[in-house]
Image: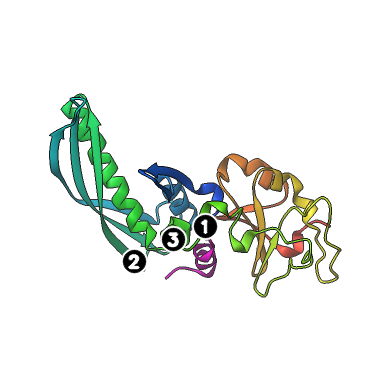
Amino acid sequence: MFNEKQLQVLSYEVDSSRIKIREKGNISLSYLEAFDIIESANKIFGYGNWSYAVSSLMQVSQEQNHNQNVVICYKAVVRIVAKDITHTKEISREDVGFGTGIAKTLSDAHEGAAKEAVTDALKRCFRTFGNQFGNSLYDRSKNHHAQPNNKQLQQPSSQNQRAYQHSNTQTYQQPNNQSQPQHHQSQNHHPQDYSSLYNLGLTIIEQGNNLVVIGDDLFSKKDSIKAYGFRWDGNSKMWCKPIEQRAA
């Protein structure tokens, strides 16, 4: 159902800059924030190509803690639907989430618990679409917050500076200042051409016959992206330009 570009992005390891850490007892838990999940869904699936609905929302418990605060727990069941760009195919996911509201007033506790339960269920639904939605964070064998970037988008090491060319996808990144890669004969574009985009935290990858810009908060950086000749592709929901247009 998903196109090739969507499948490639979904297969990437989650960028460590998106991962947040919170403490629960003596354990550090890695997670993605709700706004980040929604923003990623908009980027990957496209605005209007996905939706969610709350199937059920119910109160589970209510008590008062030692500080005389009201403590309420809610359970939510959320269903998400993702569609292809033609809206002729769709795939759905459903999962459950829990939320706790702690406040001095009943209304505030109810509000906090209900919102947290829906958010938790929404994140758990998206998790089934893979690493970009935090599924790999459940793999305890990986040290997620210690990884500077995902594998597909890592800078080349000093011993492998020529590894810009991949079989299907090519990544362009700002080279190490102390050891810049030599110009490759089959590559008529030097990574430094996009230095200002790298400084904005963006990455350029080669997909098929196009160069594609990926990164966070692309909309606010659109003027800089357009200055390099990239144009918004409404079908793929990405900033692209043909490879033959890349500047020397």
**Start-end of magenta stretch:** 1-13
Which quarter of the figure is the N terminus placed in? bottom left
Q: Amino acid at mark 1?
A: Asn
Colour pattern of the rendering: rainbow
Q: Amino acid at mark 2?
A: Ile
- Count numbered badges in the picture: 3
In the picture of the structure, the residue carrying the numbered disc 3 is 140
User: Looking at the image, which residue is at 46% across and 45% down?
Assistant: 21
User: Looking at the image, which residue is at 65% across and 59% down?
Assistant: 154
Task: Determine the secondary structure under disc 1.
Answer: loop
Residue 152: give x, y in percent of width and height.
Answer: 61, 63
In the visual, does 91 lie left or right of 230? left
User: Looking at the image, which residue is at 71% across and 51% down?
Assistant: 229
In the visual, does 217 lie left or right of 46? right
Residue 111 included in the magenta stretch of the image: no
Residue 201: give x, y in percent of width and height.
Answer: 64, 46
Of all residues, the one furthest to the bottom in this rendering is 167
User: Looking at the image, which residue is at 57% across and 53% down?
Assistant: 146
In the picture of the structure, the residue carrying the numbered disc 2 is 91
Q: Which mark is residue 99?
A: none
Q: Amino acid at mark 3?
A: Arg
Disc with the residue nearer the chain's start (2 vs 3): 2
Q: Which mark is residue 143?
A: 1
